[in-house]
Image (spheres, helix red, strand yellow):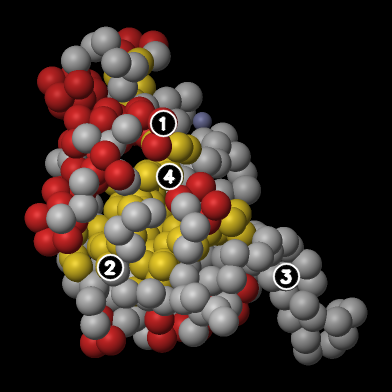
Amino acid sequence: MTGRNVSANDVAGPGSAGLRRVRRPALTDAGGLLGEGVGLVFTSRAGGVSPAPFDSLNLAFHTGDDPANVTANRALVAEAIDAPPMDFVYLEQVHGAKVARVSGAEQHGSGAGDALPACDGAFTTVPGLVLSVLTADCVPVAVSYPSGGAVAVVHAGWRGTIADIVAVALRKIREEMGLDPADARAVMGPAIAACCYEVDEGRAGLFVERYGRRDGVVTGRGDRFLDLPRANTLNMLEAGVREENILRVGGCTCCDGGYFSYRREGSTGRQGTFICIRHIRR
Ligand SMILES: [Zn+2]
């Protein structure tokens, strides 16, 4: 990743018969929030080639979209952030709490179809590897250790949040790398917010049990609305991350039609969160 700002602009010429007009992916470049030498981008639904209901930058194969479109969209993202598709690592996300360490070339994603099996988080110390999670309401959390040369990303839906997957990642990095959560910085990306995330009594009860009623996780009419970003913030604070180092970008995916939202649409695409340690360019 070069860190340059990438905006939506046409890459195809004036439309002519047989040519599909393609807009470059609109990316939010948030690398500056995670410290020097870290690349972090969030995609939206804009700038890809998929038709409705996956329009247009759907990055997930399991959605029912034509795989050729997903492959094309992943290639567009790779091009836009100036990283080879082979350096991307995708995860087979299963709403669990397993975090994988990605350390070698054999774990590179192909950018076209491979994914690390059954995990919802990953970390690496290898420059140039691009770790990703794909979401459509769940909370993507990107983590860096500016002094220690490690980055991580996790996918935290309600199950991952209750299972404290972000703390699992922080603990694993401390055990394997000796890096202190107090030195970590975290950025949460676009996710469904409490305004839209109404759940049934059973699920709300799980969150009351875990977080109590005081901290704003369970909120709204009838105590049926969950604030997952808030819950993940509390998880990180408990794990030792400093409050000033926890940031959030992007709004509510369900309110903002610029994002894919499973809650709003059901059958839809997935946006991506991508993090890497940048190669030093000389
Ligand atoms: Zn909302």
Q: Amino acid at mark 1?
A: Glu
Nearer-the-camera pick, 226 or 4: 4
Figure check: 205 above or below 29: above
First-in-chain label (3 vs 2): 3
* Distance (Cα) linking label 4 and label 1: 11 Å
Which SS class for mark 4?
strand
Number of residue marks: 4
Q: Where residue 260 sits in the image (x, y, percent)?
A: 52, 51
Label 2 beta carbon less than 8 Å to ligand 1: no
**Which residue is rendered at x = 69% and y = 70% of the image?**
24
**Neighbours of disc 1 within 10 Å: few (<14), some (14-19), many (20+):** few
Q: Which residue is mark 1?
A: 244
* Contact? badges 1 and 2 (CB < 8 Å): no
Q: In the displayed structure, does residue 183 sit left or right of residue 264?
A: left
Q: Is residue 170 visible?
A: yes
Quarter of the rendering occupied by the N terminus: bottom right
Q: Is residue 34 left or right of residue 161?
A: right
Residue 23 tag number: 3
Instruction: Give the Cα distance between marks 4 and 2.
Output: 17 Å
Residue tagged 4: 187
The residue tagged 2 is 124
Q: Relative to 101, is 174 above or below?
A: above
Disc number for residue 129: none
The quarter of the picture where the C terminus appears is bottom right
Frontmost of labels 1 and 3 is: 1
User: Nearer the observer, disc 4 or disc 1?
Assistant: 1
Q: Give percent across and percent down for residue 88.
A: 40, 76
Residue type for callout 4:
Val
Residue beneath the point at 37% across and 85% down: 110
